[in-house]
Image (cartoon, rainbow, N blue to C red):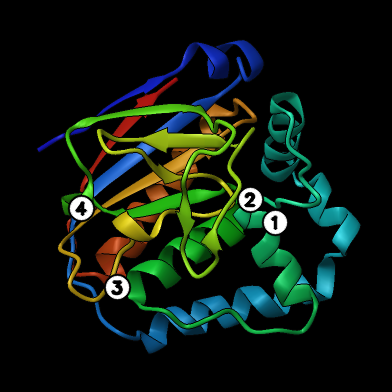
């Protein structure tokens, strides 16, 4: 089963540079992968030696996502894009949460590229149509590990049932777990840099091959 991804008129109006990549792959998830964490630890050391809180905000993909939030009426310093939040956590001397191999893998791609990436259990998504729109006032959304999240003004992917993911947090309903057998990773490129987007998609595929017993799956570009 493939997914059809579209952009709402609001996203096209306020974020005309947007380009996305979807990676759909069959996988085997595990609770932990030591080799993957060696890569995460290596990135962490480099980040802490070379970056500051101010320089993180200037990273092109992060800066573009923050600007998209402002255009849609959301304060990016209060509702941080996940890629920025992950980097800031590491700079504060904290470690990343160890969730499972698929979640940890997506986090690594997000850290390396600056893209906020949604990672979903494809079999929990309702229907095959996904539209990237804008959160509405009072729209219910249960962020993973966060509880109710105010998504008004946030970019949000919706399936037949409702919202499944924003650049700040994905929804509990479609989250991955150790039983996940198909992953849908949505890479959000608000910077419009197609080359960097392709590299992020290829990095996702490479890590899925190395650590999730996948052939890398298929990539769809949209926007």
**Mark 2 neighbour density, 10 Å: few (under 14) some (14–19) many (20 or more):** many
Determine the image quadrant of residue 17: top right
Residue receiving disc 2: 114
Which residue is at 74% across, 39% downward? 66
Q: Nearer the viewer, mark 4 or mark 2?
A: 4
Is 205 placed above or below 92 here?
A: above
**Mark 3 neighbour density, 10 Å: few (under 14) some (14–19) many (20 or more):** many
C-beta proximity under 8 Å, tags 3 and 2: no
Q: Nearer the viewer, mark 3 or mark 2?
A: 2
C-beta proximity under 8 Å, tags 4 and 2: no
- Gap in angstroms between the C-alphas marked 2 and 1: 7 Å
- Gap in angstroms between the C-alphas marked 4 and 1: 27 Å
- Gap in angstroms between the C-alphas marked 3 and 4: 22 Å
Near-viewer residue (132 or 162): 162
Q: Earlier in the sequence, mark 1 or mark 3?
A: 1
**Mark 1 neighbour density, 10 Å: few (under 14) some (14–19) many (20 or more):** many
Q: Is residue 152 left or right of residue 218?
A: right
Q: Earlier in the sequence, mark 3 or mark 4?
A: 4
- Gap in angstroms between the C-alphas marked 3 and 2: 21 Å
Q: Quadrant of the N terminus?
A: top left
Residue receiving disc 1: 84
Q: Residue 212: horizontal and vertical position, in percent?
A: 24, 70
Near-viewer residue (214 or 177): 177
C-beta proximity under 8 Å, tags 3 and 4: no
Residue receiving disc 4: 124
Q: Which mark, by number, is residue 211?
A: 3
C-beta proximity under 8 Å, tags 2 and 1: yes
Q: Give the structural element (helix, strand or loop) at label 2.
A: loop
């Amino acid at each position: 089963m493939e997914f059809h991804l579209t952009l709402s008129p609001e996203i096209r109006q306020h974020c005309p540079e947007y380009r996305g990549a979807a990676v759909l792959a069959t996988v085997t998830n595990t609770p932990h992968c030591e080799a993957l964490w060696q890569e995460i630890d290596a990135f962490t050391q480099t980040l802490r030696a070379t970056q500051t809180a101010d320089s993180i905000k200037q990273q092109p993909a992060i800066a573009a996502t923050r600007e998209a939030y402002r255009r849609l009426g959301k304060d990016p310093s209060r509702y941080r894009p996940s890629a920025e939040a992950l980097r800031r956590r590491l700079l504060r001397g904290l470690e990343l949460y160890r969730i499972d191999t698929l979640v940890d893998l997506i986090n690594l791609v997000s850290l390396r590229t600056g893209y906020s990436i949604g990672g979903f259990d494809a079999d929990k998504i309702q229907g095959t149509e996904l539209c990237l729109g804008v959160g509405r006032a009072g729209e219910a959304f249960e962020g993973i590990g966060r509880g109710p999240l105010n998504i008004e003004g946030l970019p949000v992917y919706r399936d037949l049932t409702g919202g499944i993911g924003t650049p700040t947090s994905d929804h509990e309903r479609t989250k991955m777990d150790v039983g996940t057998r198909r992953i849908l990773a949505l890479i959000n490129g608000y910077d419009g840099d197609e080359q960097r987007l392709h590299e992020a998609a290829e990095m996702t595929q490479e890590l899925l091959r190395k650590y999730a017993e996948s052939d890398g799956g298929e990539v769809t570009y949209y926007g």
